[in-house]
Image (cartoon, rainbow, N blue to C red):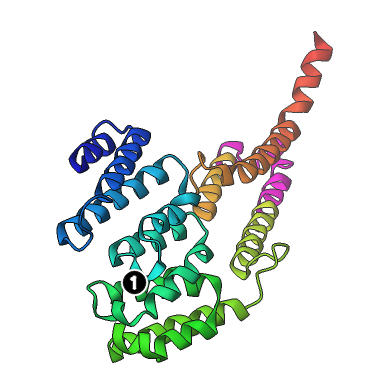
Amino acid sequence: MLDTAAEQMMVEQDFQEAFDTCDRGLESLANMDQEDSRCGELKAGFCMLGMQALAELNQWHGVLSWILQQYEQQEKIPAKIMQMCILLYSKVGEPAVMQDAARVWLHCLSNSTVTGFGTVAELYLLHVLVPLGDRDEALQLIQGQVGSSAFSEEQRQTALDVVEEKERQNEEPPPDPGIRPDSEIASHSTQGSVIRKLQAMLRFLYRKVLLAGSGSFSFRKLFLAAVLLYMLLLRMDPALPSSFMWISKLLQLLRQMWTAMFAPYHQALTQRL
C-alpha cells in the first residue's frame, strides 16, 4: 500500500487517491504490534506521503491535526515528520501553528537523543521563532538545555548573531515610500543638468542658424555639429525608453532651426504661386 500511495502521488499525481491510500494503510497498521520497528517506519512513511498529498490538495491547514490523530501526543511525532511540518507551515506563511508543538517536542528529554533533534531545533529557530520575532524564546532555546544538546559552541554563536541581526532589522524604521533614495535623486539631478547643457548648446546653434542666410554659417556643418554633440554628450541607445525625452527635445530644437532657415523662402515661393 505504501508503494501504491507513492506511485499515485509521484507518477499519477492523483493526490486525493494517494491520501486515501495512506489513510487506509494507517488503519491497517493499527492492528499490528506497535512495538515492531517496521510498523513505525511504515507509519512514518504513510504520514509523510499523506502530508504531501494534503499540501498538494491545498489542505495544508489540516496537516498538523491529522498527524496528531496518528501519534496522539506531540512529543511522539518522529523527527522527520516534525521537520516537514515546520517547513510546510513556514512556506505557507503560518509558522505560529507549529510553535507549541515544536516547543513541546524539543523539551521532551527522550527526543534529545534521537537522530534529527538538532535539525528540528535549527528549523524551529530559523523558521518559527525568528520570523515571529520571539527574541526571548529564541535566546532561551539557544542558551538553554535544548541549545546545549542541539548545537555546537560555534553554531550557538551563529544562532545568536542571527537573532541579533533580526532584532536590528525590526528596530530600523521602514523606508518612507514618498522619499526617493539618494541615488535616484542624484540620477535625476544629473540627467536634468545634462539636458540643460544640451539645450543651451542647441540654442547657441539656433542663433547661428539665423546667420545662415548671409552665407557666413553652413547649414550642413551646423546639422553635423548638432548630431556629433548629441552622440558625444549623451551616448545613449535611441531604442531605450529613457532616451525618448532627450530625442524629443533635440528634434524640437532642430525643427525650430529648420523653420527659421527655410520658412521665409517657403512663404515667398507660396506667394509667387
> Residue at (48%, 50%) from the top-left corner?
62
Q: Is residue 20 magenta?
A: no
- Residue 248's x, y, as percent? 65, 39
What is the quadrant of the N terminus in the image?
A: top left
Q: Secondary structure at mark 1?
A: helix
Q: Nearer the viewer, residue 23 or 247?
A: 23
112 to 201, vertically: above or below:
below
Looking at the image, is 103 positioned above or below residue 233? below
Q: Is 81 displayed left or right of 33 in the figure?
A: right
219 relative to 31 in the view: left or right: right
Relative image position of residue 99 (x, y in whole percent)? 49, 70
Q: Which residue is located at x 64 percent, y 53 percent?
A: 198
Q: Which kind of residue does numbered mark 1 sit on?
A: Val
Q: Is residue 226 visible?
A: no
Q: Position of residue 26 (x, y in %)?
A: 29, 47
Q: Nearer the viewer, residue 3 or 72?
A: 72
Q: Residues within 10 Å of mark 1 (few under 14, many from 20)?
A: many
Residue behind mark 1: 120
Q: Give the prevailing secondary structure in the magenta stretch.
A: helix
From which residue to which does the magenta span run? 201-222
